[in-house]
């Protein structure tokens, strides 16, 4: 597939500029970068999944993409029915081990129950040809903190939940990677963002925790601990590495915001994070 066709699927020159890398779209360096990032392989996968069709639902887009990637999913604990129906305000939170695939699987499952789901999504993916009907773009990098785009998306998220919608939110804002925690090196989410506590203050919505098992490659997790940009640039490559695998996830019980709102924000965040991660050690319901 030619670079021009690939760049219609993934605007990798614009993506590179987001990280301070500038080169001509038809240059040898850009082609090399496209190979490193997995742009050609992703564009081929995009074609096989026929994602250019726009007369199918977002959920069908995800199912077709997952099928082309040969990725199966398995709910090992809980019930997605806990997400309720459209018109019932809800904030769904999750750990973020994969960066793209966990978002797609969570959205796919939520859309089987309700069509009013929005996802706060890394703006880096705005350069990828995706169905954007359910996406709100945010950029977690420090230099975009407080940017008009981020503020607008957060305000839209609050308004959506207040009106009875469902919001899927990954509070870390970044993928899990190597972290030093309580004297040990562990692969887990970086500290969760206080936006979650503020979101609950403004909406009083119940919270549904989800947990995804697994992690990205050692290169991603270790290298990502050194450079956030390096980690972000590897996301497509990591997605392609999941080809032919199974994604396991768990769903917890809905948590009323009433008791949470009586707690200080830091304690509230600690409880929600611990509750989410506890789903990773609950007995497997499918055994």
Image (cartoon, rainbow, N blue to C red):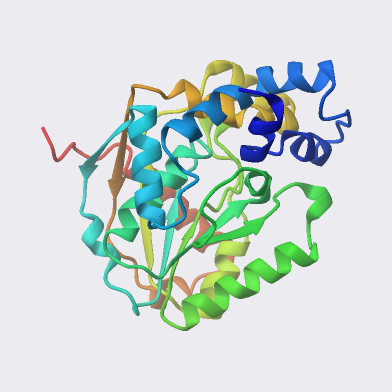
| Residue 242, picture quadrant | top left
- Compared to residue 83, the image places residue 36 above or below, namely above
Marks counted in the figure total 0
Q: Quadrant of residue 259?
A: bottom left
Residue at the spot x=50%, y=71% of the render?
A: 263
Q: Residue at left 19%, top 38%?
A: 283
Question: What residue do we see at 56% from left, 75% from top?
Answer: 158
Residue 230 locus on image (x, y percent): 72, 27
- Residue 277 placement (x, y as % from top left): 40, 43
**Which of the image's four quarters has the N terminus?**
top right
Q: Is residue 266 visible?
A: yes
Q: Is residue 48 left or right of 143 when viewed as pictured?
A: left
The C terminus lies in quadrant: top left
- Compared across the picture, whether 75 is left or right of 120 comes to left
Q: Nearer the viewer, residue 80 or 258?
A: 80
Image position, residue 83 (x, y; %): 29, 64
Is the residue 61 above or below the residue 87 in the image?
Answer: above
Taking depth in this image into account, of 69 and 156 the one nearest to the observer is: 69
Furthest residue in direction left, as rendered = 287
278 on left or right of 176: left
Instruction: Name, please, the residue furthest toward the bottom.
Output: 163
In the foreground, 124 or 185: 124
- In this picture, residue 250 sits left or right of residue 226: left
- Residue 49 sits above or below residue 132 on the image: above
- Does residue 186 appear in this view? no
The correct choice, above or below, for 231 with respect to 84 in the image is above
Q: Residue 55's spot in the image, x, y percent?
A: 41, 58
Locate residue 197: give its quadrant: bottom right
């Amino acid at each position: 597939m030619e670079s021009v066709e690939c760049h219609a699927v993934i605007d990798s020159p614009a993506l590179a500029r987001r990280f301070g890398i500038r080169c001509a779209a038809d240059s040898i360096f850009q082609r090399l970068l496209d190979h490193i990032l997995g742009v050609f392989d992703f564009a081929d996968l995009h074609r096989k999944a026929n994602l250019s069709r726009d007369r199918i639902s977002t959920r069908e887009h995800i199912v077709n993409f997952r099928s082309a990637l040969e990725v199966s999913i398995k709910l090992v604990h809980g019930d997605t029915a806990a997400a309720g129906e459209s018109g019932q305000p809800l904030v769904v939170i999750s750990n973020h081990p994969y960066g793209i695939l966990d978002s797609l699987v969570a959205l796919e499952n939520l859309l089987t129950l309700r069509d009013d789901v929005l996802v706060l999504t890394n703006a880096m993916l705005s350069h990828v040809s995706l169905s954007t009907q359910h996406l709100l773009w945010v950029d977690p990098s420090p230099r975009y903190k407080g940017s008009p785009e981020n503020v607008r998306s957060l305000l839209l998220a609050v308004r959506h939940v207040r009106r009875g919608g469902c919001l899927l939110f990954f509070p870390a804002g970044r993928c899990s990677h190597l972290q030093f925690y309580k004297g040990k090196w562990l692969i887990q989410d970086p500290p969760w963002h206080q936006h979650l506590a503020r979101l609950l203050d403004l909406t009083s919505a119940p919270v549904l925790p989800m947990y995804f098992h697994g992690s990205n490659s050692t290169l991603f997790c270790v290298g990502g601990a050194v450079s956030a940009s390096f980690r972000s640039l590897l996301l497509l490559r990591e997605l392609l590495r999941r080809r032919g695998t199974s994604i396991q996830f768990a769903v917890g019980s809905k948590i009323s915001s009433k008791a949470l709102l009586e707690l200080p924000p830091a304690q509230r965040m600690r409880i929600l994070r611990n509750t989410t991660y506890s789903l990773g050690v609950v007995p497997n319901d499918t055994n």
